Image (cartoon, grey):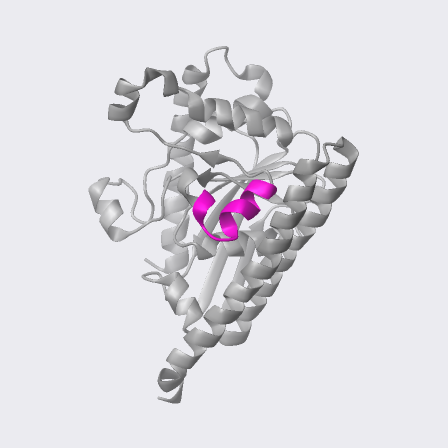
Amino acid sequence: MMKVVLIPLIFVLHTALQITNLALWGGLIILLGLVKLIIPVAAFRRALMTVMHGMMFCFGTISVGFIRFFNSVEMDYRIHGELSKENWYLIVANHLSYLDIILLIEFAAKRIPAPKFFLKQELIWLPFVGLGAWALDMPFMRRYSKAYLAKHPEKQGKDIETTKAYCQKFKSTPTTVINFVEGTRYTPKKHALRASQYRNLLPPKAGGVAFTLTAMGDLFTNVLDVSLLYPKNAKHPMMSMLCGQMTQIVIDVNVMEVPEPASDVPADPQDFRSRFQGWLNTLWAMKDSRISQILGH
């Protein structure tokens, strides 16, 4: 009863601390991003990026520290395979909440290189998040509808060009490229509208990941199949977390071989994308089965 009475107070205090943490580290990252923009010296920029990545990890670590403080939560990390800070990784993950991003940053802090998220163009306007991601050289993807492309055929393939341009930046130092291949956060409504063949997931989209592999396939050491789960708070994970009601978070990581060596990538990227979609569909079916087992379905 006492915990229920305290929920509004926990929400206000926890939210204020999370926003302050985001504003502090996001503001510093944006400031250094502007310095990096002004001083175009490669060695200086690399050193500055190391500092900025450290700030991003501080944000994630402190944010998860607040989550642990305000919630009686079990953080269940399940890692199947070896991880290293010296490798290049491609993460394919399901997407349930904006909380996923915080958790992946904290997960990466002591285990793998700094993560780079593929973000929707609209997020550039999100306070501290948008410009912070820009400063950290994270790619913003703009999706065009079929109707729009019919009227503006010159926009066809722009997302591919963006992917390839950013991948060039990731070749100089060990990096973790993260793609939420479902394209959006899972909800029961979206699950029904897309007539998903999976019980716990939306259908995956191969485009961004396939073109990342064509640009960087020879660099990636492994693919990390990551499943993020909130077993007892699946309906509203972010709100549950802020209200002190989060009880369990599962981060299941399966270290896999890169599906197709870069040397085997065909000259026609669309052909590779089609074959990769088949691989991704199989992976998603196995992920769906594993999630059902974890959730006890």
Relative depth, front residue between 30 and 101: 30
* Residue 94, above or below 218: below
Residue 212: x %, y % from top left: 52, 28
Relative depth, front residue between 28 and 139: 28
Is residue 183 visible in the rendered image? The answer is yes
The residue most toward the bottom is 2
Q: Which residues are magenta?
A: 124-135
Assess whether residue 132 is covered by the magenta stretch.
Answer: yes
Residue 22 located left or right of residue 126: right
Question: Looking at the rendering, in which quadrant would you find the N terminus?
Answer: bottom left
Residue 189 located left or right of residue 286: left
Q: Residue at 74% across / 38% down in the picture?
A: 46
Residue 60: x %, y % from top left: 58, 58
Residue 279: x %, y % from top left: 43, 29
Relative depth, front residue between 170 and 12: 12
Is residue 244 visible in the rendered image? The answer is no
Q: Residue at 69% across / 52% down in the picture?
A: 54
* Residue 276, above or below 227: above
Residue 122: x %, y % from top left: 40, 42
Assess whether residue 217 is covered by the magenta stretch.
Answer: no
The residue most toward the front is 38
Question: Looking at the rendering, in which quadrant would you find the C terminus?
Answer: bottom left
Query: Would you say the magenta stretch is mainly helix, strand or loop?
Result: helix
Relative depth, front residue between 43 and 57: 43
